[in-house]
């Protein structure tokens, strides 16, 4: 048994006690009320999920296990000479809430290598799909195709399933998946965009380093990968990809079914696909300007034209956040350090200067500030990854870390099948007193 699994096993009983006490002794205490606007409006703000892995404060932004992004990056062990932490150590941190030592993170690096072999049939499946299939469709299909490997599903079908032990095979599936996802992502990328010429994994490298190597992009792209996977991992439980993964897993579907479903949600343009949309939109602006640097006036006009044509400004606004997303800020800091004079970064920065005021003037968006997706594409573009329809796959590799940690804990705490109640429009009218 690995050190991480031992640690997890030791933590689960206490957490079970806390949850059981809340349920049994305080189950009737109200946590809020639900309005008709919330029922119709996508359950916005309804407090009906629980997770200890991350928390999103509207003004402060995300905290992973209680730590802000800068605190997380500073606390976690890093490979020698690198600026960003081991992704494997971050997985340990999300799972346990404890910062691993460098030795513990490196032990996981080795363990991930033993789990990273992707079955040949996954590559065969990817190769059988039309080459112009969206990479998110390929990514989701690849994950789903591996469902036959699920240890959780085998355990469930073994005839001696015990709810109290179900976290163990879920943990196994989750770890297997995270170890394989960068290999699958890099394979899709090189098959679709790099002449189908593949670069074998380098077993001396950690996840971020190996991903950059398999993508064929030099340092500091390894640090970009570490930063990117960590930043995109978790954003509490209500967002579409996290909630979908949790919802599907609540039916005791295994991690493969659940993650594939969550990835499909991430592929929506109002969610993860927004990062591709930002770059597509910016490229459109650049083309129209024929490479000339835009003035704020010209940029404002493009923003208004987009809004007036009925579209949203991708990368701006958020369902929970009410300030600049610290994930945006973190990537902006990276840009200021590594690519301050890059023209595309200047476009992105000019958007930051003009969009919030325009969204406020338009008066619709509750949050006029940029989210994570407004800044991430420019970094990828700078390092040669200009195929923007691939960006959401990168997001998906990162998001998997958070949602898989969550569904492992879902099983550890025995959370039940999710089943909110629906009403009819007639009933809402009666409740409103208009019928
Ligand atoms: N541009 C134009 N209009 C916007 C807007 C934006 N960036 N953000 C919100 N609005 C509009 C909404 O479309 C809505 O209009 P209607 O009343 O006509 O329907 C109105 O403002 C109120 O919306 P809201 O309450 O502020 O926002 P929601 O919680 O409904 O939606 C979204 C949150 C992120 C989906 C929204 O801000 C949006 O569409 N943003 C652009 C797409 C985007 O960047 N998505 C990625 C978000 C982060 C993420 O999940 N990453 O994966």
Image (cartoon, rainbow, N blue to C red):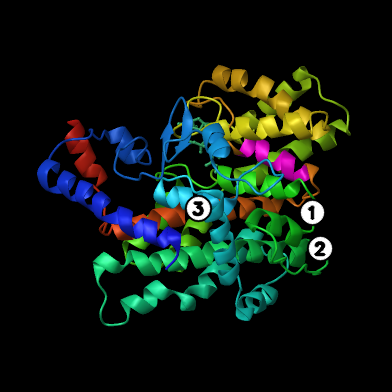
Q: Residues within 10 Å of mark 1 (few under 14, many from 20)?
A: some
Q: Quadrant of residue 27?
A: top left
Q: Residues within 10 Å of mark 3 (few under 14, many from 20)?
A: many
Q: Is mark 2 within 8 Å of ligand 1?
A: no
Measuring from the top left, give residue 7's x and y in whole percent: 38, 56
Q: Which mark is on residue 225? A: none
Going from N to C along the chain, the mark reached first, 3 or 1, is: 3
Q: Which secondary structure lies at badge 3?
A: helix
Viewed as shown, does residue 294 lie left or right of 311?
right
On-image quarter of the C terminus: top left
Going from N to C along the chain, the mark reached first, 1 or 2, is: 2
Q: CA distance from mark 3 to mark 1?
A: 24 Å
Q: Quadrant of residue 66?
A: top left
Q: Which secondary structure lies at badge 2?
A: loop
The residue depicted at 40 percent of the width and 50 percent of the height is: 96
Q: Is residue 421 magenta?
A: no
Task: Pick whichever, 292 or 175, lies toward us.
Answer: 175
On-image quarter of the N terminus: bottom left
Viewed as shown, does residue 195 lie left or right of 44?
right
Q: Which residues are magenta?
A: 373-381
Task: Pick whichever, 104 or 257, lies toward us.
Answer: 104
Q: Which mark is on residue 91? A: 3
Q: Which residue is mark 2?
A: 194
Front disc: 3 or 1: 3
Q: Is residue 376 magenta?
A: yes
In the rendered view, would you say 48 is above or below 190?
Answer: above
Q: Is mark 1 within 8 Å of ligand 1?
A: no
- Say whether residue 190 is visible: yes
């Amino acid at each position: 048994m690995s050190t991480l699994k031992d640690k997890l096993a030791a933590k689960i009983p206490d957490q079970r006690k806390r949850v059981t006490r809340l349920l049994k002794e305080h189950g009737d205490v109200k946590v809020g009320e639900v309005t008709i606007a919330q029922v119709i409006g996508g359950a916005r703000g309804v407090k009906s999920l629980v997770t200890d892995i991350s928390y999103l404060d509207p003004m402060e932004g995300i905290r992973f296990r209680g730590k802000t992004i800068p605190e997380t990056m500073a606390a976690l062990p890093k490979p020698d000479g690198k600026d960003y932490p081991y992704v494997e150590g971050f997985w340990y941190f999300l799972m346990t809430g404890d910062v691993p030592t460098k030795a513990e993170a490196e032990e996981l690096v080795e363990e991930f290598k033993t789990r990273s072999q992707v079955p040949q049939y996954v590559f065969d499946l990817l190769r059988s799909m039309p080459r112009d299939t969206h990479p998110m469709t390929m990514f989701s299909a690849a994950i789903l195709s591996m469902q036959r490997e699920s240890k959780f599903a085998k355990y469930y079908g073994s005839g001696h399933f015990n709810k109290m032990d179900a976290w163990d095979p879920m943990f196994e599936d989750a770890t297997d998946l995270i170890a394989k996802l960068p290999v699958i992502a890099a394979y899709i990328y090189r098959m679709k965009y790099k002449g189908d010429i593949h670069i074998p994994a380098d077993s001396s490298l950690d996840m971020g380093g190996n991903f950059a190597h398999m993508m064929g992009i030099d340092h500091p792209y390894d640090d970009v990968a570490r930063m990117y996977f960590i930043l995109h991992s978790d954003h509490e439980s209500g967002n579409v990809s996290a909630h979908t993964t949790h919802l599907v897993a609540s039916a005791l579907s295994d991690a493969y079914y659940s993650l594939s479903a969550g990835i499909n949600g991430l592929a929506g343009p109002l969610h993860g696909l927004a990062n591709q949309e930002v770059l597509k939109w910016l490229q459109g602006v650049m083309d129209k300007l024929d490479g000339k640097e835009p003035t704020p006036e010209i940029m404002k006009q493009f923003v208004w034209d987009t809004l007036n044509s009925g579209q949203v400004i991708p990368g701006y606004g958020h369902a929970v956040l009410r300030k600049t997303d610290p994930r945006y800020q973190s990537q902006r800091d990276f840009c200021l350090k590594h690519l301050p004079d890059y023209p595309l970064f200047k476009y992105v920065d000019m958007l930051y200067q003009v969009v919030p005021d325009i969204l406020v003037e338009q008066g619709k968006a509750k949050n006029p500030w940029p989210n994570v997706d407004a800044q991430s594409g420019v970094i990828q573009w700078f390092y040669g990854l200009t195929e923007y329809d691939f960006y959401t796959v990168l997001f998906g590799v990162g998001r998997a870390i958070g949602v898989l940690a969550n569904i492992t804990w879902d099983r550890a705490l025995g959370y039940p099948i999710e089943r909110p109640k629906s009403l009819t429009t007639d009933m809402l009218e009666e409740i409103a007193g208009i019928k």
